[in-house]
Amino acid sequence: MSEAVQLDKDPYAIPLEEFDVSDARLFMEDSHWGYFERLRKEDPVHYCKDSLFGPYWSITRFNDIMEIEKNHEVFSSEGGITLADRPADFQTVNFISLDPPRHDVQRKAVTGVVAPMNLAKLEPIIRERAEKILDSLPIGEEFNWVDLVSIELTTQMLATLFDFPFEDRRKLTFWSDMATGGELNGGPIPETERRAALLECLEVFTGLWNERVHRDPSEAIDLITMMAHNPNTQDMDPMEYLGNLILLIVGGNDTTRNSISGGVYFLNQFPEEFAKVKNDHSLIPTMVPEIIRYQTPLAYMRRRATQDYEIRGKTIKAGDKVAMWYVSANRDDEVIENPDQFIIDRKTPRHHMSFGFGIHRCMGNRLAEMQLRIIWEEILKRFDHIEVTGEPERVQSSFVKGYTELNTILHAK
Amino acid sequence: MPTVKFIEFNGTEHTVDANNGESIMVAATSNLVPGIDADCGGECSCATCHVLIDAEWRAKLEPTTDTEESMLDLNPDRTEDSRLSCQIIVSDALDGIVVNLPEFQY
């Protein structure tokens, strides 16, 4: 369907064999929902024979994705987690795109930074920064929530995790956007520009690495010192270092950023849910995972079959690419009751697909939840409500599901 | 009906009746024992139902599968007592089992 995305067309009027749900425009226009609904119903294991990324399978039901997530021997992550194949002359490598055993040792080298003990130390820092950001916002005037709040808070957090020069922190945002927005992934950024930005990122971080090898790892808790002193990561080659940096930058930035913006948007779409949490702040801990489900900040993860595999009567062939559409699983009414409704007091709100499952499950999921919890606690303390003044602008990507603009007006208590 | 004794990290004890054939995780969550998240719902794929079981009781359990092993291994706080409670099935042989809860789930 590369030519014929037919955004204005009813997805039920297009033949299934023409479906290409990897088209970034579907997400930018927020018109992907009907396509996934139809796939879940009529062709939950769907083969697209031609796309920007070549042929690929789409898995759209919750339980089928779970089956594939758990089978990391058949469904390999080697080669990358997005549908785009990495160019042969620019092969960044990171632990999310490795299989065991290399995956396990590299992941363990950095898990400590988001370990619960460390999160307890980070909580007061995040709260103080959230307070400062919220106290600096204009009241009664329109502004872009994405820029002044979502990006600011998550980028400050990321700078803290890396112990990155604080005044240069927006570089992290820039590199994150470059890493995911490339034309090879269906985004707007030319490949030459993307590579130049990422090489700049590597250069800056190489400087930090050279400084951190002299730090005492028993005292420093930043990610770079951890990697520079862990036997499993200290000898990474530059492209491996860059790959892991991008993973941590995107993972620690983009996803939480878009969930912060998404929450504001959803609470405007569902005013009765806002009224609930406004009257009862103890609902914040169950609202947070619901925001993450409803947003699904990463729309899919890719695997590649290492052998033929039968699922729902179809045969995925060895070597085929498989997209597990988290965005669809999170709306699967076989598993989630009333999935199209945003409901902040669900009984099992964490039973969603946004973090993935199995050995590649999101490492920073508790940090993400904590950031969202704190920001909503502080918002509800300060303001009467946040008014969304128009439809958001969305990111041109079928992988990162997010917003570039969400205009809002804050109303004082 | 076998009973399971959960001990929270802060020492609070909860003794609950459990049904043969259900998992220890289900026994905890259906009796509102705090400290077990079980995000994946019992699929052995999130490791948020981590529990600690001492050697004596552990000897009576089925050994860990490769899947449980790979999920446990993601947890930097893993000890030799670590198990995933969704993978332990209640039976009469486990009547009275003591299940210690960790300080946090990942």
Image (cartoon, coloured by chain):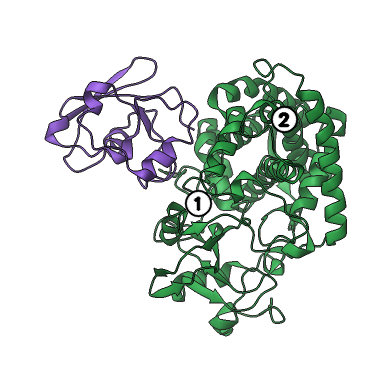
Chain colours: A green, B purple
Mark 1, Cα crowd under 10 Å, few <14 / some 14-19 / many 20+, is: many
| Of residues B71 and A32, the one drawn nearer to the viewer in this rendering | B71
Above or below A351: residue A309: below
Closer to the chain start, of discs 1 and 2, is: 2
The secondary element bearing badge 1 is classed as loop
Circle 1: residue type = Met
Residue linked to disc 2: A224
- In x, y percent, where is residue A403? 73, 53
Q: Secondary structure at mark 2?
A: helix
Residue matched to label 1: A353
Height in image: A96 above or below A308?
above
**Residue drawn 72% across the image and 22% down it:** A128
At label 2, the amino acid type is Ile
Residue A66 drawn at (x, y percent): 43, 55
Give the camera-side residue of B83 and A121. Answer: B83
Q: Who is closer to the viewer here, B54 or A283?
A: B54
Instruction: Judge whether A360 appears above or below A17 on screen.
Output: above
